[in-house]
């Protein structure tokens, strides 16, 4: 298996633009997580899905952030409109179940200027 | 081993020595713990895990110790190598809740 695949690896966008981050989890994994990593706050859980259903989105910082999982092999994290303080590395991770180890993608480094 | 604010605690170790990275976890109900390694520019990578019914687990060159009484977890790396230089995170799981990560410790191996 190729592991968790995220795209793009790097994204530079202007403030106010819409940004969409993409994730393909490991086949057969039932749980998917979106994390954000910054120097200030470390790894923060934004939202997670189980069997394609959003379970907890309390980590999503604002209404500008939304996430979807239309099927078991694809998820998106959207920021609209983006702001400079959204600059961070965004990781997607998947696991077989909620209480087993999560496997991370390589991350998307987002820079909003 | 946990960081406060902007700065990650750093552990500097001579190549060939053993490393011990510590982690204080927060939830006494946590029943599953994982150590992750994150190299620059990459996502966190699973190293070793332990369930709460154990107090020690060994892997290849790594050992995880769990002390539930004081909510403490440690990762021991034997014969540390330059390739071990990275940021190490402990993560805890309680029931059906997702991983909660600590802030991390930077391991720097001196050749």
Image: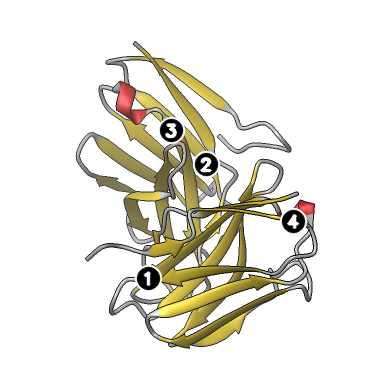
Which residue corresponds to the image point at 49% horizontal and 59% vertical from the top-left? A8
Which residue corresponds to the image point at 43% horizontal and 33% vertical from the top-left? B86
Q: Answer yes or no: are tags 4 and 2 on the same subunit.
A: no
Of B31 and B34, the residue lying toward us: B34
Which chain letter goes with mark 4?
A: A
Mark earlier in primary sequence (3, 2): 2
Q: Are marks 2 and 1 in contact (CB under 8 Å)?
A: no
Compared to residue A62, the image places residue B92 above or below, namely above
Q: Nearer the viewer, mark 3 or mark 2?
A: 3
Distance from disc 3 to disc 1, alpha carbons, whole Å, reads 23 Å
Q: Residues within 10 Å of mark 1 (few under 14, many from 20)?
A: many
Q: Answer yes or no: are tags 3 and 1 on the same subunit.
A: no
The part of the image, by quadrant, that contains residue A54 is bottom right
Residue A89: percent from the left, percent from the top? 58, 51
Residue B15 appears left or right of B61: right
Which numbered marker is on residue A11?
none
Residue A73: percent from the left, percent from the top? 37, 80
Q: Answer yes or no: are tags 4 and 1 on the same subunit.
A: yes
Distance from disc 3 to disc 4, alpha carbons, whole Å, reads 32 Å
Residue A88 appears left or right of A108: right
Q: Residues within 10 Å of mark 4 (few under 14, many from 20)?
A: some
């Amino acid at each position: 298996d190729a592991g968790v695949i995220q795209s793009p690896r790097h994204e530079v966008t202007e403030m106010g633009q819409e940004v969409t981050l993409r994730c393909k989890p490991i086949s057969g994994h039932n749980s998917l997580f979106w994390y954000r990593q910054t120097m200030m706050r470390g790894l923060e859980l934004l939202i997670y899905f189980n069997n394609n259903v959003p379970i907890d989105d309390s980590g999503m910082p604002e209404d500008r952030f939304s996430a979807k999982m239309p099927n078991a092999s694809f998820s998106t994290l959207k920021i609209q409109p983006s702001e400079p303080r959204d600059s961070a590395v965004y990781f997607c991770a998947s696991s077989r179940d909620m209480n087993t180890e999560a496997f991370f993608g390589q991350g998307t480094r987002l820079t909003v200027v | 081993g946990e960081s406060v604010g902007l700065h990650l605690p750093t552990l500097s170790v001579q190549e060939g020595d053993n490393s011990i990275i510590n982690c204080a976890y927060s939830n006494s109900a946590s029943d599953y713990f994982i150590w992750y390694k994150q190299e620059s520019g990459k996502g966190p990578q699973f190293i070793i895990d332990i369930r709460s019914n154990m107090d020690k687990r060994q892997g290849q060159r790594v050992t995880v110790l769990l002390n539930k009484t004081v909510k403490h977890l440690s990762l021991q790396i034997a014969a540390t190598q330059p390739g071990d230089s990275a940021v190490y995170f402990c993560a805890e799981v309680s029931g059906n809740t997702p991983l909660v990560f600590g802030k991390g410790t930077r391991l720097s191996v001196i050749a």
